[in-house]
Image (cartoon, rainbow, N blue to C red):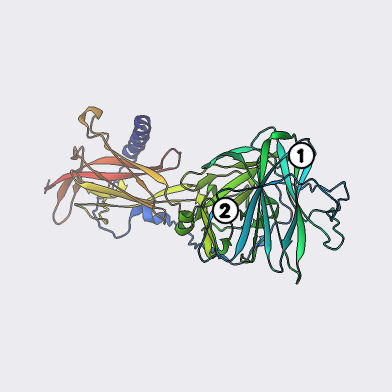
Amino acid sequence: MKRFRKAIAVMLSTMLLFAFGMTANASQGTEGASDQAVKAESNIHLTTYNEDVIKHLTRADKPEGITSSVYTMKENINFKAPETFSLKKETVPSLKASPTAATASSATYSGTITEEGGTQFLYPVYLQPGELLQAQLDGPFSAQLDYDLYLYEFDMTTGDLNPNAIDASTYGTYFNNYEQGSASLPENVGTRNAIGSEKAYAIAVHAKKGSSINDPFYLTVDTSSSYDAYEPDESAFHAYNFTFSTGGSSLNSRSIHSGIDNDWYQITIPASRNYDALNVKLDSTSESYGYKAEVYGALSGNQMVLLPQTNHNVSLNTGTYYVRVYTTNQFSADHLYALTLKPVLRAGKIVITGYDSSKNGPNDYPTYSYGRHYRVNGSSSFTVKGVVTTTDNYPVANAPVDVTWLNQNWTESSGNRTRTGTAYTDQNGAFSVTVSLPPSTGSIAEYLSGAISFTHYFDLSGVAAQVTGTSIIDTDVVYHFAYSIYGG
């Protein structure tokens, strides 16, 4: 901060020296009051914008960041033939459903795979007309193992498996840090029975890389009859496009209806933009339920990397990202969560728009020999007002601003040479910083002739407003008034 103040002081001193070096106005100095601040003449027109409400989602058919490699069964498995069924039903704590939630069934199974390329099946899973099936694979919890999840239909009459998976989740193993601990993103699949009769399904856990007789996997299966219209979208492979405006966009037509329900959205960050971060936030009620909105980036091999958030802000580069909404606590099909994505706009300009003071008010702009500038009396409060915008004039909210006032007629040792203050911009990009000024030294005398003549004594002082930590700055000259003498 001391280095910043010194740099600003040097810059203001140079500016003031330039002001002193200007050719003085040979004409008679006149004093006038105006209701228009000098800086307001820069005519900053802020583009107004409102948050958009998304009413329709379109599925991203070809995700740019991840690829699907659906595993096709090499065997013609007949489910009527005797099988060794090694999955074990687990009694595990479940997430809490709302008391008003529709009837749903959920069960968790565990098992192991003893050789790479091996597959464990869970079947049959029956789905009634209109019901939704969701399955989630957690573990094995080892960085050396990579298991995938597949969903198949089979003919209930013949018992033959349809070898083409109707859904697949093939993330690469990548351990992220969650509140619940370190883990790779779970694999999730889902389907909806859209016909008028019962259907049967098989769920397969496939050891894509490695295997272990000691490291189990956990497979949770949920069927429900109450869910939102966009289901199923259980993995990033089935994400919906979420296009947001400069003012932000929100979606409030979706629910989390089960403990393993995952809603996925795809967002695209263009190369040409006026932001470097995105605010990703759920409504407070959903957050109190334990709902999470997380942003992921995709690496090679479909490794999904959880991106860090600070106050719901996520820093993003150009490219494709994925937003996941799920619950860590309770859920309800009747509760519609509100998801809002809003760009954290990048500051591109700062403009001093006006001043105010306890003794001079906002409209004291005399014209002395150094031009028309705001005048502030010594030993008074002094307020600097301005606005921070993007380069294309969108207001930047929550931008930190540093304001420095300098009167170089005072020595540094006097403690009166500089005054500094800080503030954050409001939702309109506006800032206001007030400092208490020392007395003026009255180093300049300006004779004002007229029917009644005066001599005014004042100093030239400088003002700088800067977006903290950047080179974005605006400067101005202010008259620091000392006193006047009648007929001097």
Residue 380: give x, y in percent of width and height.
19, 46
Residue 32: give x, y in percent of width and height.
25, 56
Q: Nearer the viewer, residue 73 or 49?
A: 73
Tags 1 and 2 touching, CB below 8 Å: no
Q: Quadrant of residue 458?
A: top left
Lateral position of residue 124 relative to residue 5, left or right = right
In the image as oriented, which residue stretches furthest toward the left? 486
Residue 282: give x, y in percent of width and height.
50, 56
Q: Nearer the viewer, residue 444 or 95?
A: 95
Q: Amino acid at mark 2?
A: Tyr
Q: SS for tag 2?
A: strand
Residue pictured at 61% horizontal, 56% vertical: 261
Lateral position of residue 462 relative to residue 48, left or right = left
Q: Is residue 217 something one can see in this rendering?
A: yes
Residue pictured at 27% horizontal, 41% vertical: 460
Q: Residues within 10 Å of mark 2 (few under 14, many from 20)?
A: many
1 or 2: tag closer to the N-terminus: 1
- Residue 309 sits above or below residue 196 on the image: above
Lateral position of residue 357 relative to residue 288, left or right = left
Q: Which mark is residue 208?
A: 1
Task: Report the label total.
Answer: 2
The residue pinned by badge 2 equals 326
Q: Quadrant of residue 3?
A: top left
Q: Nearer the viewer, residue 130 or 473?
A: 130
Residue 230: give x, y in percent of width and height.
65, 63
Q: Residues within 10 Å of mark 1 (few under 14, many from 20)?
A: some
- Residue 160 sits above or below residue 14 on the image: below
Q: Amino acid at mark 1?
A: Lys
Q: Quadrant of residue 17?
A: top left
Question: Where, quadrant-wise, is the C terminus in this rendering?
Answer: top left
